[in-house]
Amino acid sequence: MEVVTTRAELAAARTAHGELGLIPTMGYLHAGHLSLVAAARRENAAVAASVFVNPTQFGPGEDLQAYPRDLQRDLALLADAGTDLVWVPRTQDVYPAGFATTVTVAGLTDRLEGAHRHGHFAGVCTVVAILLGAVCPTRAYFGRKDAQQAVVVQRMATDLALGAQIRVAPIVREPDGLALSSRNVYLDAQQRRASRVLSASLRAARRAYADGERDGERLRAVVAEVLAGEPCARPDYVSVADPQTFAELDRVAERGALVSLAVRIGRVRLLDNTVLDTPPGGDDAGLDAPPAAG
Ligand code: AMP
């Protein structure tokens, strides 16, 4: 596995590979990231990852400084998973002196995470555009854990003809249902137990939907009621929205729905989501199984 830092080193290393899958990450890797590496391995001759905690996607007062980092461990995990090339840029390699460009995707970024984290998606889109431009992957892999991000990046890649096919992989969860996240390390034991309420609330929505509930407001209420049962959980939002436009739904129809939420547990802000209409055995099958004790 080759590890490079500068854009020039990356460009030289890139010439050794033809078809290439890229997994952009902020590091502190877990099985969710590694599932993207595995997907890229299946679909490409070679696999690249980037490890970069992108400062422009953090707002003032967010956890940029505290964001967990362990590069040696990340590199060992990537090597074990069969990664061929890793770009670990410094901030000046991504944003050289004089950098003055911001990429924004209009409309899609007004809701959900975009409404709660101003400037977040401009930072994400700008860094992903740089990564795709510098690495020139055949395909780039994103997790549905960040469902809005995946759709926004897809829009940007299409609009700007960035050349990479955007692939979206299912959410990887702990046995008790908690979606894996680098930020889970912030949770103390009590908060970790409380965090089960996120997946439990989505499971309740899936059950209501399976029982025939199609009213958007009632589905949001089902989720909110489960969250309200956990005193440590403070929801930022609960959404039942169109999976492509993120417009809140009065009724769930043939396009299905993205049920998504952001919940604060102590100082930790956690995201989770599920897609209603997934066929049985689909992406979220793990969520329907009874949770293992954790
Ligand atoms: P991050 O390092 O948090 O920026 O995440 C890098 C990529 O991994 C993003 O595309 C995420 O959506 C994806 N990812 C993060 N957590 C998970 C998970 N639990 N399951 C699947 N993909 C994930």
Image: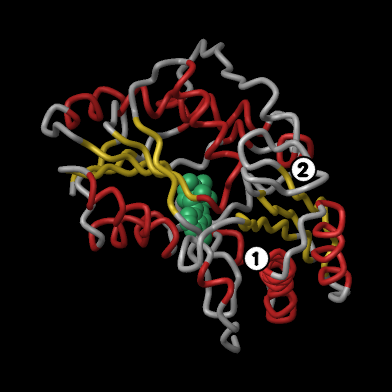
Q: Looking at the picture, how far across and down is residue 182, in whole percent?
A: 54, 59
- The residue at the point 78 percent across, 35 percent down is 115
Residue 51 point in image, percent of width and height:
40, 44
Of residues 289 and 233, the one drawn nearer to the viewer in this rendering? 289
Q: Amino acid at mark 2?
A: Gly
Q: Nearer the viewer, residue 119 or 148?
A: 148
Q: Is mark 1 within 8 Å of ligand 1?
A: no
3D distance between C-alphas at marks 1 and 2:
16 Å
1 and 2 marks in contact (CB < 8 Å): no
Residue 181: image x %, image y %? 56, 60
Residue 143 is at least partly visible in this image: yes
Q: Residue at x 37, y 59 (%)?
A: 35
Q: Is residue 230 left or right of residue 105?
A: right
* Front residue (pair 30, 7): 30
**Which residue appears farthest toward the bottom when viewing the image?**
293
Q: Residue at x 67, y 68 (%)?
A: 210
Identify residue type, mark 1: Tyr
Q: Is residue 69 visible?
A: no
Q: Which image quadrant for residue 133?
A: top left
Give the residue at x 46% y 68%: 281
Above or below, 163 against 220 in this view is above
Q: Residues within 10 Å of mark 2 (few under 14, many from 20)?
A: few
Secondary element at tag 1 = helix
Residue 191 x/y as whole percent: 73, 75
Q: Quadrant of the C terminus?
A: bottom right
Q: Secondary structure at mark 2?
A: loop
List the residue tagged with mark 2.
61
- The relative height of residue 173 versus residue 219 in the rendered view (above or below) is below
* Sooner in the amino-acid sequence: mark 1 or mark 2: 2
Q: Residue 186, labelled with which disc?
A: 1
